[in-house]
Image (tube, rainbow, N blue to C red):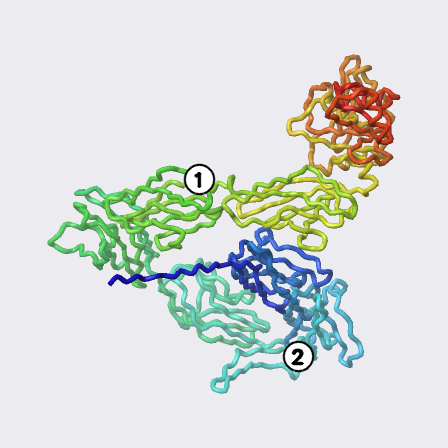
Amino acid sequence: MTMWLALLVLLVPVFCRQTIPSIVATPYQSVPYGTSAIVIQCTVSSSPVATSVGWRRVSLIDSTTEYIYASNSNGKYHITDSMINPHLTINNIVFSDENNYVCFATNLAGTGHSNNGKLNVTSEIPSIIATPQKQFPVDGSPKIIIECNISSSPTATSVGWQRTSLDGFSTRAIVVAISNGKYQVDNSLAYPHLTINDVSLADDAYYACFGNNVAGKGISNSVRVDVIELEQGDLGYYVCSASDGVMTVNSDDIFLIPSDMRVPLGVKVPKTQYSPVLFTNVILQCEVRGSVTSVKWFKNNNVISIANSLRFSGSDPNSPSLTINSITEDDFGYYTCQISDGVDILNADIITLLPKGIPPVVVVPRHLPVPIRGQQFIIPCTIDPSQIPLQDVQWIYINWDGITIDPINITSPLTVKYEGSSVDSPSLVINDYQSSDDGRYMCRATNAWGNDVSPAVLVTLESVPTLLSVQSSYQSEPFTDVILRCTVNSVIPVIKVFWQRNQNGNILTISSDTNINKYSGSSPSTPHLTISDTNNGDAGSYICFAVNHAGTGNSPTIALSITTNNVIPIVVVAESSYNVALGSSVTMVCTATFPLHITTNIVWERITDGSKTVIVPYTSKYGGGSALTPSLTIFYAEESDAGVYICYASNVFGVGHGTTELHVANSEDESKCPSGWLYNENSCYLFTITSYGIPWFGAKTFCEEHGAKLAEIETESEDKYILSNMKNLGSGDKFWLGGSDDEVEGSWKWSSGTPFTYTHWLPGEPNDVSGVYKQDYLMTNYEGWIDHPSSLLHVRHYVCEMVANEINCPSDWLSYDNSCYLFMDSRNELDWFSADNACRENGTILAEIETEAEDEYIRNIIRNQYFGACKPNMIV
């Protein structure tokens, strides 16, 4: 039996829903002024995945918005490179950071915004402590110091001290400048300690330190200065005692003598033991008081003769300490300082002098020549015995396997392999040198005071690796891989290979285990360095290093550059200028091409009279101006919107831009001029820019073909208007105007035949040569007018001018000199009468030419066409 299995397949349509990103930011943070850094977290939930993310900050005062560009913030901001958690780090917190912060993200469905992440910046008045709480200076003390420690965030801007009388009724600030040296305050905003000089009973008062910052004024505790007046009964010795509950420690005796009393005889030594190094100098200190008339020093109870001695000095009332030059071992002993006032004799405590020597200093050259196989090789060793006889010299050997021979046996009768290594001949001589002698050697010298061992020096028949770079420079496009090739030559095995990159002095060492997702190679088996997914940060100078037992070799420098010509955004603004009526809307079309689909930011900027303003998109005033919609729409145009606009597109590799100009006019003025022309004082102006330049007569012809003329400047206000528009175009080039002196040298007229009544020549212009006939033509720049002797000069800019239409013509009609003209195109040829009837049916007449100017205007429009005859073009 045959069985059939039927399969039912259900086709279910699947629809993918796209929603704008949902974003959550840290809602509130309060941080002290001066905090080094804080992080506002942002979590983006997006389907499809967000294509760009960013932050903006919103003023808490007027709600103005500013976009944050971390790359241009000089380290102020950092945005985590993530489409899911683009956290914002703000460094070095100041009061201006107190704002709302909004995280935003864009996907194919649009742009989503987070809640406000508010940052509150706090501050505190300075916290101040003055120490000690009390001081008890003696009347007549040279000075006392009251310390002040200020903790302040933000930092204190000013500090000072105040003095309060003991009864509390009088408090005044201490002014150092007028104190005649009585007071001194340290020049510090954190530790402005107060010094009171020449202490007297009048200084008995309370003192307080104060500091000011933006949060207010802080003041310290009060410090009492209680000035003590000495009496004769205060004469005597004082001892300071301190205890931790277990042990008690006493200071040296302090002898207090009131100034009006005779000082009794006294002597003491601060130290009772000295251990100077042999052949150095030492001073045995002795302190005396009273009317000392003589000082003597004794060694082992024998008086030391100071007179005419080259080694001893001092030992007199003015300099009681004993100086001993060039200490020897014979200076060992016990020394006593004895003083007398002619009546009494006092001895100080005994001082023990214990001279000590120093070990020898051993020096072996860091680098040695390469030995020759089978010949004798000498490793020099130089020893400074410090004038102390050497007792022994030995050598230590370490082979490639780390096995140490300590010391090398020089005296063995079974070998003549080694010589030297003695007090008289410390250098090591190796006979019949072989590769088995390769290794590291150290020289050790010993005297009665110790020994010294030299650093290990490498001796080998082999040499360090030699390295060659295949080429000296490489160029790489972003997001590609590049291999920096390095060839290593070494007779003995290579232990390690590594690379170093130098970027303006910043060195990065790259080995085989450095960022394995970014780098590969850099090993003895594969010394080449492969850099994956290159970017701007990979550019720099690279050096390859190889290490063997003989040392380290390196390649020549290899330069790596990252080409960005094809990855900087290409920006094109559709029109060189836009016109909009007051209250209307206009869209300035900006097209930004993003190579390699790199995340790109779009920013618009307006320039008006040299002042720059960054446009903040997504407000009631503006639309677009983002990576998804680069074109900028201005709603409800105002006069203040006029100016030069620049569309910037930036990515990590650079910035591209395009420029246009926006003109705003009321509807009445706009109707008086053709499209693209600017209205001013009953005239219409066209500022024309060519990419190739045009001579004066070419510019004149262009203007006349459009029913206009090259601009004729007759007043200062007209001159300023034209110069202002030239500046807004942002070009430093010159503009043709309609003036020349081609009829009579030096007699300037406008192209309409009118002589100049107003001029704005630059200094030194016009610079005609007297008596020489030249045809000169007028041009202008930002500063003033210039004449040029050739009409063939190609200038990129020129200005056309026509009389504004004071009447409103119907649609499709042209305006000239307060008349309206319609150039009609008939499919059939008409005779004069039919053309006349056609005009009368429209309530008009066939054109009647009354002036030469009107005739020239019509001829420029129709050129070689007839009118009023059987031709397709007819004039109404």
The amino acid at mark 2 is Lys
Farthest left residue? Answer: 414
Which quadrant of the view contains residue 207?
A: bottom right
Q: Quadrant of the N terminus?
A: bottom left
Q: Which mark is residue 134?
A: 2
The amino acid at mark 1 is Gln
Q: Earlier in the sequence, mark 1 or mark 2?
A: 2
| Percent coordinates x, y for residue 296 in the rendering | 49, 69
Residue at screen point 67% across, 82% down: 232
Q: Is residue 762 above or below residue 238?
A: above
Q: Is residue 748 above or below residue 366?
A: above
Under circle 1, the secondary element is strand
Alpha-carbon distance for marks 1 and 2?
74 Å
Q: Which residue is mark 1?
A: 475
Farthest right residue? Answer: 850
555 left or right, relative to 799:
left
Residue at screen point 67% across, 75% down: 259
